[in-house]
Image (cartoon, rainbow, N blue to C red):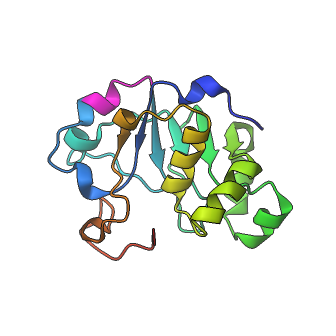
Amino acid sequence: MVAEMNLFENMAIVGNSPCEIGLGNGVKIDSHLNVARFNNYVISERTIKDYGSKVTHWVTSFFPDVKFNGNDYGNVFCPFPLFHSVYGDRYKRNSELVSYLDGKLVFIPTEYYEDLIKVVPSPSTGIAFLYWVWRERQLNKQSVYGFSFFDKSLAHHYFESGGVSLHNG
């Protein structure tokens, strides 16, 4: 399935880095027509001021630790070409969830992913999605929030008290 190009227009892309804490960008994020959030994102009273509350699209890796929260998303983006036999077999994913969301799924074009892994052999879900949107010529860096770009001091998610990042940029 191929994404309609206008899905990426006027989209806030909200990563899970704690770099937004204290910046008060929640209203700005929510002012976008579309808001994409990642994997196990959290919306709570504590986070709304900095991260907003709106979500229209979900971006997920379908890793087994990713939990579906039951929201009715406009689309579910997977920045890994799981439909391709090479990648579908290489990456063990929550296949039951993939099947459940089938009608809403949009996968990264295989050629985009293959170009990306030449530079970043093991990309995070966020980096893969940013690359995909950039390849579609729809990436507006003023609409990208919550990405620390591998800053070790911000190596945990905003909804966690700390921890070690599994992302190696």
Q: Is residue 92 shown to the viewer in this render?
A: yes
- Which of the two residues, 132 or 163, is positioned nearer the viewer here? 132
- Which of the two residues, 39 or 121, is positioned nearer the viewer here? 121
| Image location of residue 78, percent across then percent down | 63, 50
Vertical placement of residue 102 versus 74, above or below: below
Seen as rendered, the residue at the extreme front is 119
Quadrant housing the C terminus: bottom left
Residue at 57 percent of width and 32 percent of height: 137
| Image location of residue 124, percent across then percent down | 52, 62
Seen as rendered, the residue at the extreme left is 22
Residue at 20 percent of width and 48 percent of height: 46
Vertical placement of residue 81 versus 141, above or below: below
Compared across the picture, whether 65 is left or right of 79 comes to left
Residue at 59 percent of width and 23 percent of height: 6
Which quadrant of the figure has residue 17?
bottom left
Seen as rendered, the residue at the extreme right is 85
| Image location of residue 32, percent across then percent down | 39, 25
The reply to whether the magenta stretch includes residue 47 is no
Quadrant housing the N terminus: top right
Count of numbered labels shown in the rendering: 0
Compared across the picture, whether 92 is left or right of 10 comes to right
Residue at 70 percent of width and 69 percent of height: 91
Vertical placement of residue 72 versus 107, above or below: above
Q: Is residue 70 shown to the viewer in this render?
A: no
| Image location of residue 155, percent across then percent down | 32, 69
Vertical placement of residue 32 versus 96, above or below: above
Extent of the magenta region: 28-33
